[in-house]
Image: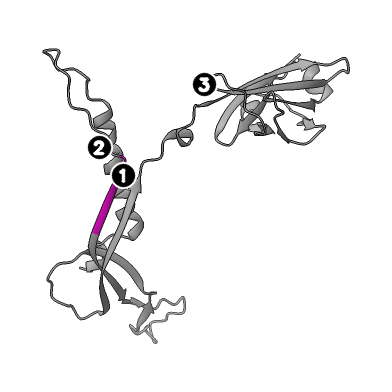
Amino acid sequence: MSSVNNALTLKQILLGISDSLNEAQNHLRNIKPYDEFGRPNTLYTLPYLDFNLQVEAEFEKETTSEAQKSNRFTESQPLPYQPHKQAYEKTIAFKPVTNSTTNSKETNKITSTISGRFVAIVPNEGLPQLIINAVPKKTTTIHIYDIDVEVINAAGEKISDALVEFNYNQEKTEKLNPNATLNHGTSFLNASEIRTDENGKASAQVKVDAVDVANGHILILDVNIGNVLTKISIQQ
């Protein structure tokens, strides 16, 4: 049995460490602040985790034998068995260093140390969470809507010079309009990326298809700043 089959890739090792770290953090986060007698419990956090692993990187190349097949076969000329060697590319895998014997396969082993640190990143880089308020409003021009956006944080501060992105969410729109033929005529009249002014506000205009509006279709738009996202709907 190949020793590589019992080994792991570097990606699997790092993901295993990160998954275990997340489980530990979740367990610590769910500890009750007081015990059953009302005494304060000791609470812990994991701001970072240093790791140092000694692993063995193994390069292995194997060949297998397969019988050649042919559609040309007669009783007078039976098909002889001709094993065919099929070569596979070298693979690399990692495993903890152990004392083991070397088999007959062509192997190259390198023992090395992998060191690193997992650092806990506070959401939004420790700043108050952003809040996006987006409201669609009909204009005097038919089928054109103003999308007024205000960006603040959880502390109530207005966020200026924030890059606001506007996108038409076709997938959500189709789910909200089953068995409907959408014209997908939604298009922004101005730039799909706008920065907020000194008051934390930005505005975009969107023109929707007249047939979609007349048929009562609901159109979904995504408004986001980085990974902070809000959705708005437009309908007649």
Residue 51 magenta-highlighted: yes
Asked if one can make out residue 177 in the rendered structure from this viewpoint, the answer is: no
- Can you tell which mark lies on residue 24? 2
Q: Nearer the viewer, residue 7 or 153?
A: 153
Looking at the rendered structure, the kind of residue marked 1 is Tyr
- Say few, some or many: other residues with alpha carbon within 10 Å of mark 2 (under 14 / 14 to 19 / 20 or more): few
Q: Start and end of the magenta stretch?
A: 47-52
Residue 34 relative to residue 204: left or right: left
Q: Residue at x 18, y 27 (%)?
A: 42
**Helix, strand or loop under label 2:** helix
Which quadrant is the N terminus positioned in?
bottom left
Residue 79 x %, y %: 37, 83
- Say few, some or many: other residues with alpha carbon within 10 Å of mark 1 (under 14 / 14 to 19 / 20 or more): few
**Helix, strand or loop under label 1:** strand
In the image, residue 148 sits, relative to residue 110, either above or below, namely: above
**Helix, strand or loop under label 3:** loop
Residue 63 relative to residue 69: left or right: left
Q: How many marks?
A: 3
According to the picture, the residue beneath numbered tag 3 turns out to be: 154
Mark 3 or 2, nearer chain start: 2
Q: Image quadrant of residue 175?
A: top right
Looking at the rendered structure, the kind of residue marked 2 is Ala
Q: Pointers 3 and 2 in contact (CB under 8 A)?
A: no
In the image, residue 29 sits, relative to residue 10, either above or below, namely: above
Task: Measure the alpha-carbon separation of dots 1 and 3.
Answer: 26 Å
Residue 193 x %, y %: 72, 36
According to the picture, the residue beneath numbered tag 1 turns out to be: 48
Residue 207 magenta-highlighted: no
Residue 4 x %, y %: 26, 66
